[in-house]
Image (tube, helix red, strand yellow):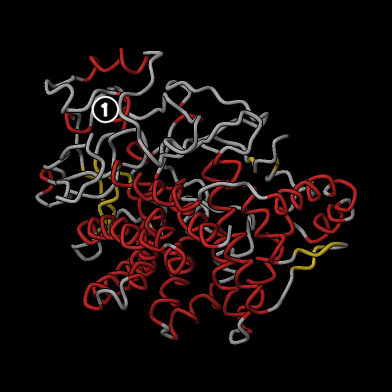
């Protein structure tokens, strides 16, 4: 947002934001009574229900079985493992890498608050990074998707029964994909921090691979949806461009390696790669707000004045998201939920709330606040804003419904998820073929397998929610909704 329009919006903050902020203060004083540690445990357990490949002996989600054991065979590679992104049976590399980055960031910043769940969070990261190492094993090649999305979406079947096309799609020097390669580098670098003291050899492997993949992304520039449009669009099409992923990858490599070349890359490419664009966007396709918040930590610690402009962008992000500021890209529902246009709104709720919490922590350690025109955003206010969003997800909303499956007395029963909605292999050993699953998709009955910890796309702008499988934008869970929520729940489990 331009400085002029931001200032104009801020003039109205005292009038329009007061009721919401008063309610926020009351919410903080009264407290919500949620069991954040239980929600944390469940949010991590969700990832076990999304696993692809050969399941380990300690698998806790028992209605799942081994699946997609021949992924990569069409190209002579072992591409088994990883996660299904949502309620289908495709492995999309772009959102899987972003999920990995955010799970890692959750552990880096809030792992100390996870208690006994820390080991499960680390396992969730490693399940992803083991796969990312496979898809980046060949230099200057990244396998970015396994499974034909059109074939898969034409069927409603368990991952264990899949007979749809398991095509493997790659980027290389002739078919660039700086976006997904940059995000993959970020994921590997962020995860290398997670394993630095836990498994130094594995950490070095991740960091060295991140360096190689980032170099490939930077040398061969372009968006992966250019060469792979028919496979990846409209599912995870790069609408925002690849420039932000190059900066994002460089920032995480700077953080993980402390090598001067990445700091210099970020400073040199700040303007060229549009660091100041769309400052209040953060998700699998747009990293701008995340870049600015992550770098600002160093500025606030007083050791990176060359990054000062990123901190200004982060401050502008905070001001643009405060309730009461009429920013066209960020709205609030009547019940107080952050809302952005497009499907699966909870992805914005969790990712933006994570940034609010992370930035509040950085500000608090530096004893700083964010000036927003005639008001001030303190670290405490940012934590309250983030907590309000988490509490909405857990049931403090107009419908009194938790949007996390298995948490609280009332939650979605008919989520848009193949494995959850079809009988398990144990309950129904016979194969359920492509179109035979349609009757389960259309059934008004609750899903037979409760996908504990799954957070769905959520209600619309009026706080209404159809608990119905065909309404996939509202009823489908995704890994990238849960990943930042893990960090949020960890913090609030220790600071309720």
285 vs 189: above or below: above
490 vs 440: above or below: below
Q: Quadrant of the C terminus?
A: bottom right
Question: Where is residue 246 shown, x and y percent of the image?
Answer: 45, 65
Left/right placement of residue 189 relative to residue 393 reads left
**Residue depicted at 40% across the width and 27% down the height:** 416
**Residue depicted at 41% across the width and 13% down the height:** 444
Left/right placement of residue 310 relative to residue 409 reads right
Res 366 visible: yes
Question: Where is residue 306 shown, x and y percent of the image?
Answer: 61, 83
- How many marks the image carries: the answer is 1
Q: Which residue is mark 1?
A: 151
Comparing 446 with 103, the one in front is 446
Q: Quadrant of residue 379?
A: bottom right
Q: Secondary structure at mark 1?
A: helix
**Residue depicted at 37% across the width and 73% down the height:** 193
Comparing 264 with 352, the one in front is 352
Comparing 109 with 23, the one in front is 23
Mark 1 Cα-neighbour bin, 10 Å: few <14, some 14–19, many ≥20: some
Res 234 visible: no
Question: Where is residue 109 shown, x and y percent of the image?
Answer: 48, 68
Question: Where is residue 100 shown, x and y percent of the image?
Answer: 37, 57
Q: Quadrant of the N terminus?
A: bottom right
């Amino acid at each position: 947002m331009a400085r002029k329009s931001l200032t104009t919006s801020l003039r109205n903050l005292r009038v329009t934001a007061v009721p919401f902020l008063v309610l926020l203060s009351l919410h903080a004083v009264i407290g919500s009574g949620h069991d954040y540690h239980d929600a944390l445990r469940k949010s991590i357990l969700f990832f076990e229900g999304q696993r692809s490949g050969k399941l380990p002996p300690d698998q806790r989600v028992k209605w799942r079985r081994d699946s997609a054991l021949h992924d990569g065979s069409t190209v002579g590679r072992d591409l088994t493992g990883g996660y299904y992104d949502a309620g289908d049976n495709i492995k999309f590399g772009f959102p899987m890498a972003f999920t990995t980055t955010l799970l890692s960031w959750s552990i880096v910043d809030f792992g100390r608050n996870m208690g006994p769940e820390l080991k499960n969070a680390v396992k969730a990261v490693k399940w992803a990074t083991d796969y990312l190492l496979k898809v980046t094993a060949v230099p200057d090649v990244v396998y970015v998707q396994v499974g034909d999305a059109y074939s898969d979406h034409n069927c409603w079947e368990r991952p264990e029964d899949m007979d749809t096309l398991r095509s493997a799609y790659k980027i290389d020097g002739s078919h660039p994909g700086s976006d997904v390669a940059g995000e993959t580098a970020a994921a590997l670098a962020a995860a290398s921090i997670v394993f630095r003291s836990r498994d130094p050899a594995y950490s070095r492997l991740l960091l060295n691979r991140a360096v190689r993949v980032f170099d490939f992304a930077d040398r061969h520039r372009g968006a992966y949806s250019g060469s792979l449009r028919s496979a990846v669009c409209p599912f995870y099409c790069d609408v925002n461009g690849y420039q932000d992923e190059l900066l994002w990858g460089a920032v995480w490599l700077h953080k993980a390696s402390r090598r001067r070349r990445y700091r210099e890359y970020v400073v040199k490419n700040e303007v060229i790669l549009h660091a100041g664009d769309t400052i209040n966007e953060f998700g699998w396709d747009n990293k701008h707000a995340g870049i600015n918040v992550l770098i600002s930590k160093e500025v606030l610690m007083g050791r990176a004045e060359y990054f000062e402009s990123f901190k200004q962008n982060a401050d502008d992000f905070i001001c643009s998201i405060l309730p009461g500021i009429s920013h066209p890209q960020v709205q609030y529902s009547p019940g107080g939920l952050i809302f952005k246009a497009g499907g699966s709104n909870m992805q914005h709720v969790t990712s933006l709330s994570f940034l609010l919490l992370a930035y509040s922590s950085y500000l608090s350690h530096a004893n700083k606040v964010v000036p927003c025109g005639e008001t001030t955003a303190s670290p405490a206010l940012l934590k309250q804003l983030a907590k309000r969003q988490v509490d909405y997800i857990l049931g403090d909303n107009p419908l009194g419904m938790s949007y996390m499956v298995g948490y609280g007395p009332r939650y979605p029963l008919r989520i848009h998820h193949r494995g959850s909605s079809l009988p398990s292999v144990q309950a129904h050993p016979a194969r359920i073929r492509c179109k035979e699953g349609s009757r389960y998709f259309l059934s008004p009955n609750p899903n037979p397998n409760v996908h504990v910890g799954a957070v769905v796309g959520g209600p619309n702008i009026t706080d209404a929610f159809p608990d119905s499988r065909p309404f996939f934008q509202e009823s489908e869970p995704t890994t990238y909704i849960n990943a930042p929520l893990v960090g949020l729940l960890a913090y609030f489990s220790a600071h309720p």
